[in-house]
Image (tube, rainbow, N blue to C red):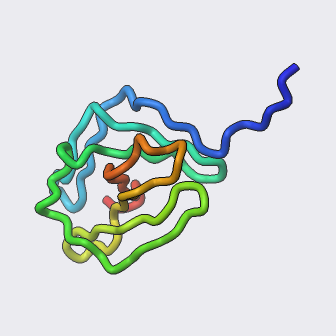
Amino acid sequence: MDDAPEPRITLHPHSRRVRIVIDGTLLADTTRAIELCECGYPPRQYLLRDDVRMGLLTGSDTVTHCPFKGDAAYFSFGEYKDVAWSYKQPLEGIKAIEGRLAFYEEVK
C-alpha cells in the first residue's frame, strides 16, 4: 500500500494542438506543448518560444513568485496586460518549463 501524497505539480507532454488567438490575432500554434497540472489550478500548457510570435508580445513590469515554481515574468499583447508568463529559472523538478510561455485561457 502506497500512502505517498500526490505530487503538487506534474508535467507531461500535451498531445493536442494548442493555438493562442487574441482578438483574431494568432499568437502561438504548436503541437509541442508541455502541460503543467498544479493542485487547485487549471492545467496550463507551456509553449516553446519558437512556437510563439514573440514579436507581438511586450515584456511587462509584473513579476510574481510561486514557492513551487519560482519567479515568473509576464508579457502583454496590445491592450491586454499580462496575458502570458514565463519562468526563466524555474525551481528544481520543473526545469522542463524553463523559458516556455503559458497563456491565460480567459483572454480571447
Q: Position of residue 50 (x, y in %)?
A: 17, 44
Residue farthest left in this picture: 55
Q: Is residue 48 left or right of residue 1?
A: left
x and y percent of residue 22 in the render? 24, 59
| 2 vs 104, nearest the viewer | 2
Residue closest to the eye, 104 or 7: 7
Q: Nearer the viewer, residue 103 or 8?
A: 8
* Quadrant in which the C terminus is drawn: bottom left
Q: Most extreme residue toward the bottom, as rendered?
A: 61
The residue sitting at 45% across, 47% down in the picture is 44
Instruction: Classify residue 47 by image quadrant.
Output: top left
Percent position of residue 19, x then y: 26, 43
The structure residue drawn at horizontal position 66% and vertical position 45%, both measured from the top left corner, is: 8
Where, quadrant-wise, is the N terminus in this rendering? top right
Q: Quadrant of residue 6?
A: top right
Q: Is residue 13 left or right of residue 78?
A: right
Instruction: Please name the residue shown 21% across and 41% down the image.
Output: 29
**Which residue is painted at 37% across and 49% down in the image?**
98
Image check: 5 left or right of 107?
right
Q: Position of residue 2 (x, y in %)?
A: 83, 24
Q: Nearer the viewer, residue 33 or 108?
A: 33
**Count of numbered circles in the view:** 0
